[in-house]
Image (tube, rainbow, N blue to C red):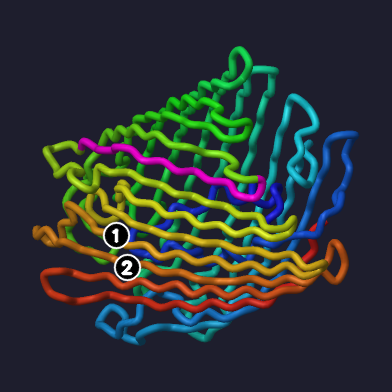
Amino acid sequence: MLTDWRKRLVVAALLLLGSRAPAFAQGGMGAMVGTPAGDIGVKLSDTNILHVGVAAEGGYDTNVFYNDQTTATNPNGPQSSAVVRVIPSFIITNTGRDGTERSAVVYTLGANLTYREYINDNQNIRNQRAFIPTAVGTLALNGSKMRLSLGDGFSRVEEAPYFEGGETIKRDVNQATAGLSVSPGGGRLTFGLRYANALDYFESGYKYASTMTHDGMLDLSWKWLPKTALFLQGGTTFIHFLNPSISMDAAGQPLSPREDSIQVRALTGIRGLITPKVTTTLSVGYATAFYDNNSKNPSGVSNFSGLLDVGYMPALQSRLGLTLQTGFRNSPVIGNYYQVESATFSASQGLGRLSVGAHGSVEYRSYQNYVLMGMEIPRKDLLFGVGGAVDYFIQRWFYAGATYQLSMARQYDDNTGTAVPFTKHQIFARLGIAY
């Protein structure tokens, strides 16, 4: 449903908090829209194009504070509110609107600037107004047998706390990557190196969870078929906590100190076109992590890493996708890491001026080394999200549409049987310009 240039605007998408649904944070999905084919844009030169857009949205959020319970810290229970958003965006690129690379040097520079306002008499809700900027830049240098790619993406996010009157969660995320791929000889073999750096900094709410991550990866692939490759991949990740001495969570409860870790992984699989309409990535492998101070490391089933990603394009404007994944992930907010099984799907369909899309996800997490008030708690979460969008292009550059998002979480403490759930509905109508 998204055109390539809009996909790049969300490269710096949020690394969602450990206990929120893996669906879509406020301000995310509403910024996305497909556009009809066509060379819309301001032509800056023979190869450089400026695309601009702005969307105005009005809607309703049924659970601003992600909390279904009525407690001493959340005395009013779930709080709902009307919401308005204004989302200007721009991108400058020398690629075609369909993603076609027109020269050996390819670049993209853009930003997506969301302003959110709650229309409500409750001051605690109005305090969740926010400016949410996202910026991204990419550069690729293409040779006959070599490709160098550089990229950086930044997002500043403000999210409501888990209870009314709590501290707004303000988060800065910067992700930078550098990659080099070489295809010697006839091009059947490709060697790839990549380094990625991620700064995940909490200005407020979860300061103890701020991290700096360094990741290195080596990828070797062999073209088994003209557009299908077998690959072998290995990588190492170092995760460093910037504020390890802070041992209180956002609600003032004592936590165990955050532990730095070194993670290693090795996997193999197949990727590319299976048929002219079906793309697949299938991988299996081994992964583990070593945490400081003799903390528990992943073992057993957590060491198994598996991925199946299938895309199907039955027609030019029709796309279906399914992703299944298992493995472990580092957890900066809750415990040290969690075992995860997840499934996501997406579907989009273009019908002339009408663009329709749907998505969904389900994720099961089992947290490890989660210590609260000096006691280790075997917490398990089930997270669910589903949503859809429809847009009608009144003109090639002017559209009207609507979006809906359902996010749910069920969080269980095995020792007490208590749950801290939330169910959140968001619905928006919008008008926009995309030129």
- 273 drawn magenta: no
Q: Is residue 107 left or right of residue 96?
A: left
Q: Quadrant of residue 269?
A: top left
Residue type marked 1: Arg
Which portion, as a residue range, is magenta?
276-290
Crowd tier of the residue under label 2, counting other residues whose Cα lies within 10 Å: few below 14, some 14–19, many 20 or above: many
Gap in angstroms between the C-alphas marked 1 and 2:
6 Å
**Residue at 69 percent of width and 72 percent of height:** 390
Residue 373 appearing in the image: yes
Residue 347: x and y, percent? Answer: 60, 63
Q: In this view of the protein, can residue 124 be seen by the observer?
A: no
Q: Quadrant of the N terminus?
A: bottom right
Q: Is residue 289 magenta?
A: yes
From the viewer's perspective, is residue 400 above or below residue 337? below
The tally of labels here is 2
**Quadrant in the picture for residue 106:** top right
Q: Secondary structure at mark 1?
A: strand
> From this viewpoint, which residue is outermost toward the top?
185
If the image is split into quadrants, where does the C terminus sit?
A: bottom right
Q: Look at the numbered disc 2 and give the secondary structure of its residue.
A: strand
Q: What amino acid does circle 2 point to?
A: Leu
Q: Residue at x 37, y 62 (%)?
A: 363
**Residue 98 placement, left or right of 80:** right
- The residue tagged 1 is 365
Q: Which residue is mark 2?
A: 382
Q: Position of residue 75 (x, y in %)?
A: 31, 85
How packed mark 1 is, by other alpha carbons closer than 10 Å (few <14, some 14-19, many 20 or more), is many
Residue 219: x, y in percent?
Answer: 46, 27
For image coordinates 84% across by 62% down, the residue present is 397
